[in-house]
Amino acid sequence: MKVTTPGADGRQRIMDAAAELFLRQGYPETSLRHIAGAAGMKAGSLYYHFDSKDDLLTAILRQGITVMVDAFEAAAADVASAPPAEVIATHVRAHLGALFEHGPYTAAHVITFHTAPAPVREAIVPFRDGYEALWAALLGDLAEAGALAGDVKIGLSRLTLFGAMNTAIEWFDVERSSLDELADTIAGQFWTGVAASGGRR
Amino acid sequence: MKVTTPGADGRQRIMDAAAELFLRQGYPETSLRHIAGAAGMKAGSLYYHFDSKDDLLTAILRQGITVMVDAFEAAAADVASAPPAEVIATHVRAHLGALFEHGPYTAAHVITFHTAPAPVREAIVPFRDGYEALWAALLGDLAEAGALAGDVKIGLSRLTLFGAMNTAIEWFDVERSSLDELADTIAGQFWTGVAASGGRR
DNA sequence: GTCTATACCACGATAGAC
DNA sequence: GTCTATCGTGGTATAGAC
């Protein structure tokens, strides 16, 4: 039953196991007994590390944001002065990397956030806002530089781009397909659309 | 506590109440006692109409697909021989209409499907595939007519478009904002992207 | 077709030994 | 830091009266 890093200390082992299970099964349908089993201990022992199940979820959601923010900042350093299309492509690839290549935390965040208990959501929202602000600033800079079409609504565009990227966890299989290709598709579609050249409105 | 169409027969009244609650709170966190209360009856009575909670969910998920398919077909009739950009815009608007304007079934479907119990998901998948096939055919026709850029991967593009539309239920408020504007943004972005003219790769 | 009453179980959480 | 044992609650589901 033990599935997670055997060397890790208790708290981290529990979080690894729980994030994985929350991602695969959802928060309410994952029991503390199951999490404890996957982390190699008994249910009662979890309470030495966390105050409650909600507390455990909160810790996981925050870690998911940390992973996303780190990915964003690494990408930003890589494209300090690149052309707009490349800036977008690099950041899309970084976000997808956070979702699929850096452990279950970001994916678990995306899956569980919106049905999380209200107190948990409220505790997490400020951190989420921090990540969204990074994207808002990125797109704002592009708009100011004249790289975006005049009728683009930045707020709506950012949200639909997030939607396109985040729902990939429902169908994309990172073992069988290329994440680079997915990133190219999403970034390209966001940037220039699918219409044949000459299709601009 | 009674919230739903008082005239409707028992089965439909239960489904209306349950779809609404599943959408707002999620499937596992909605109890049969709560559903029964909202439908104006007691928990035990539900079993006259449905075999189990999973059976009720299955019925709701199917109804959600029916609403989507109906909306698609109405849209298709409206744009029998329109230019490609208008075809896309009309179908995007129809899908968003199914999500926000034709009752809670389609939205409940999108919210609950991916964490539904495996037997329920398996029973529903064939019907979902039917709806996705409609979109696949639509985009396939556009590609054949030469309306899509040469490097567009239809399968991936369809999935990311779905992602952009469906995640709107997590943040879009149909009372406070214009669904037409949202549809324009999503369809326009899908079709021509956000880059300033001349940005084509 | 809806009610009451209840069986049975799994859950989150706590207490205290080790 | 983890264990065992257990409490209380609320869940789905069933049986049988009306």
Image (cartoon, coloured by chain):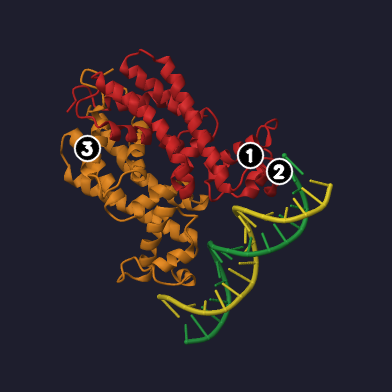
Chain colours: A red, B orange, C yellow, D green
Q: Amino acid at mark 3?
A: Asp
Find numbered disc 2 in the image and state the secondary structure of the residue it sits on: loop
Residue at image point 43% right, 28% down: A95
Residue of label 2: A41
> Which residue position holds label 3?
B184
Image marks 3 and 1: residues in contact by CB distance under 8 Å: no
Distance between the alpha carbons at the discs numbered 2 and 3: 53 Å
Task: Please state which of the two labelled residues, at mark 3 or mark 1, is closer to the viewer.
Answer: 1
Q: Quadrant of the N terminus of chain B?
A: bottom left
CB contact under 8 Å: marks 2 and 1: yes
**Between disc 2 and disc 1, whose residue precedes?**
1
Q: Are marks 2 and 1 on the same chain?
A: yes
Tag in front: 2 or 3: 2
The chain holding disc 1 is: A
The spot of residue D8 in percent (x, y) is 63, 64
Tell me what residue is drawn at x 48 percent, y 53 percent.
B120
From the top left corner, tell me how far across and down residue D17 is, in percent.
Answer: 53, 86
Residue type marked 1: Ile
* SS for dot 1: helix
